[in-house]
């Protein structure tokens, strides 16, 4: 018997209104995430991925459908949004400050553990401008993890990085997420990123978006499941080709 | 071949010396220009090329300054003008920023007030000075009110624009942690705009000085603006010139004061 999913969307639709008329963005979105699962929403730019995240995090109310959410949401953005006038330590504490938890020993210990484990402890008194893009993105993730969210939403978290740092940072972030056993939803337009990161991929059609196909990714890697090792798995290319063709088909249907 | 340590040191010293010489040269030319201007003015006045009744001359300005200085009345005039400027500056800057905060807090308010602010901003505020003086009285309160009326609208509009220009995604980042509007204000909006507020303060100080002088022109018994307008009414151009020079020194002093403050705050 399957456990109750941590997050599930049922027939979510969303329509925006503006001066020029009506803009249907989401048509019929249904999917769910189990405890500890990493899911990816994969779709072309402008297909409404961010709208889904805004609905999930409660910033937007959907026009139709229902959301079931057990637990709290942590959000990681495209850019790190570290505040320049705060040190790295004060930056990762900002979520706790907002929730008035910054003085609890438990949370202080947690922050120290996260900073030490992920190589930022020596840099805790530095300012964001003194850190590389990869370190900044790691600090942003620790800021999100510090408030201990049950579900992590990643909104194209690597797209602002150059292609080389991108690989190492996604390796970093994925390892942190797997170590912390966080239930995660990754939103991306990058096929390889989705395959190497996620357990399950939902492909989205063009606007108005609906879920086209669900892929359960099963890769045979001997080593730990990290994005870099995943890319070496024999099935990686197969998945890539299938998904690529599907997305190309969708793009030519217009 | 790379330079030896000794050679590098010599080269550095040569560079320092050249740098220092250049600075001295610039300062020398500046003093020469000022002195030349004063000497030419004085000479032209003494030779009868300039009519001293219309243009006065440096020695007469110095003489009248000495009179005001030795009997101590000059400090009363400077003090009054400074007091009014500071009062206008603090009232205008703080209430302006407070109103901008209110507009940021309630965006519907800013949409309602937008056309009024635009018109008020475009209007030359000196036109309001006579009305303001009638309302607040022909004395210090009226003059301070003129100064406030000149700087407050600019403060509201610039501060509000600065507040709005903070990255919307950073606001969403704080909201994702459940931040209230107040927390967004003092954890993000205000600290992100620290430097903008400082440059706004500098502009305001200048605007307030304008407001105070305009106010003193209209109604006053004391102050630098009073000296200038009184001097021109009784055709004592030496008094007018002295007023302008003192005003320039005061403006320079206020600006240095704010630079000092800026330096201290940025070091924090």
Image: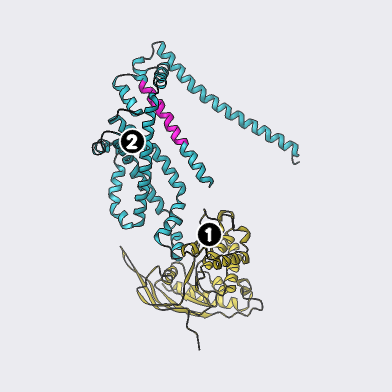
Chain colours: A yellow, B cyan
Position of A168 with respect to B258 (left or right) is right
Categorize mark 2 by other alpha carbons within 10 Å: few (<14), some (14-19), many (20+): many
Instruction: Please give the name of the residue rendered at 41% of the width and 50% of the height, measured from the top-left corner.
Output: B162
> Which residue has dot 1 on it?
A91
**Rendered position, B132 above or below A55:** above
Is A225 left or right of B67, judged from the image as shown?
right
Give the vertical position of B218 relative to A56 (above or below): above
Judge if badges 1 and 2 mark residues of a common chain: no
Question: What is the magenta segment's predominant secondary structure?
Answer: helix
Quadrant for residue B69, please give it.
Answer: top left
Q: Spatial distance from mark 1 to mark 2, Cα to Cα? A: 43 Å
Q: Is residue A5 magenta?
A: no
Chain label for disc 1: A
Q: Is residue A167 visible?
A: no
Q: Quadrant of residue B8?
A: top right
Q: Is residue B253 highlighted in magenta?
A: yes
Between A80 and B130, the one lying in front of the other is B130
Mark 2, residue position:
B211
Q: Quadrant of the N terminus of chain B?
A: top right
**What is the x, y in percent for residue B197?**
43, 46
Give percent across and percent down for residue B235.
31, 19
In the foreground, A97 or A149: A97
Residue segment shown in magenta = B239-256
What chain is tagged by disc 2? B
Depth check: give the residue in front, A75 or B129. B129
């Amino acid at each position: 018997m399957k456990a109750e999913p941590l997050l599930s969307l049922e027939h979510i639709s969303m329509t925006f209104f503006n001066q020029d008329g009506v803009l249907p963005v989401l048509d019929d979105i249904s999917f769910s995430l189990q405890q500890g699962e990493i899911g990816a929403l994969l779709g072309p730019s402008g297909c409404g991925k961010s709208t889904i995240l805004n609905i999930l995090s409660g910033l937007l109310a959907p026009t139709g459908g229902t959301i079931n959410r057990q637990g709290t949401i942590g959000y990681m953005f495209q850019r790190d949004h570290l505040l320049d006038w705060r040190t790295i330590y004060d930056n990762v504490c900002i979520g706790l400050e907002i929730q008035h938890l910054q003085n609890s020993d438990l949370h202080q210990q947690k922050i120290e553990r996260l900073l030490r484990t992920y190589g930022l402890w020596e840099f805790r008194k530095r300012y964001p401008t003194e850190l590389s893009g990869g370190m900044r993105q790691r600090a942003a993730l620790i800021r999100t993890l510090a408030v201990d969210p049950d579900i992590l939403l990643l909104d194209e978290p690597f797209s602002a990085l150059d292609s080389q740092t991108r690989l190492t940072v996604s390796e970093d972030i994925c390892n942190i997420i797997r170590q912390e056993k966080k239930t995660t939803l990754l939103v991306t337009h990058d096929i390889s990123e989705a395959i190497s990161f996620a357990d399950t991929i939902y492909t989205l059609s063009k606007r108005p978006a609906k879920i086209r196909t669900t892929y359960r990714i099963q890769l045979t890697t001997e080593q730990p499941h990290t994005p870099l090792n995943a890319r070496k798995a024999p099935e990686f290319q197969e998945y890539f080709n299938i998904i690529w063709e599907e997305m190309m088909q969708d793009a030519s249907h217009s | 071949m790379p330079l030896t340590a000794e050679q590098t040191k010599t080269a550095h010293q040569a560079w320092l010396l050249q740098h220092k010489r250049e600075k001295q040269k610039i300062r020398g030319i500046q003093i020469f220009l000022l002195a030349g201007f004063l000497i030419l003015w004085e000479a032209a006045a003494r030779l009868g090329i300039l009519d001293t009744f219309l243009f006065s001359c440096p020695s007469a300005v110095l003489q009248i300054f000495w009179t005001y200085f030795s009997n101590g009345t000059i400090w009363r005039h400077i003090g009054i003008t400074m007091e009014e400027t500071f009062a206008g500056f603090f009232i205008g800057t703080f209430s302006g920023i407070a109103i901008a905060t209110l507009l940021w807090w309630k965006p519907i308010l800013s949409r309602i007030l937008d056309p009024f602010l635009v018109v008020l901003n475009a209007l030359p505020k000196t036109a309001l000075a006579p009305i303001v003086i009638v309302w607040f009285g022909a004395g210090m309160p009226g003059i301070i009110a003129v100064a406030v009326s000149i700087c407050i609208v600019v403060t509201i509009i610039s501060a509000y624009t600065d507040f709005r220009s903070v990255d919307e995604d950073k606001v969403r980042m704080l909201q994702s942690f459940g931040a209230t509007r107040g927390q967004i204000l003092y954890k993000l909006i205000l600290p992100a705009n620290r430097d903008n507020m400082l440059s706004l303060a500098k502009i305001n100080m200048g605007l307030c000085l304008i407001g105070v002088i305009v106010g003193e022109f209209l109604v006053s018994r004391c102050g630098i603006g009073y000296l200038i307008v009184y001097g021109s009414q009784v055709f004592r151009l030496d008094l007018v010139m002295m007023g302008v020079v003192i005003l320039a020194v005061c403006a320079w002093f206020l600006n240095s004061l704010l630079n000092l403050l800026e330096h201290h705050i940025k070091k924090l």
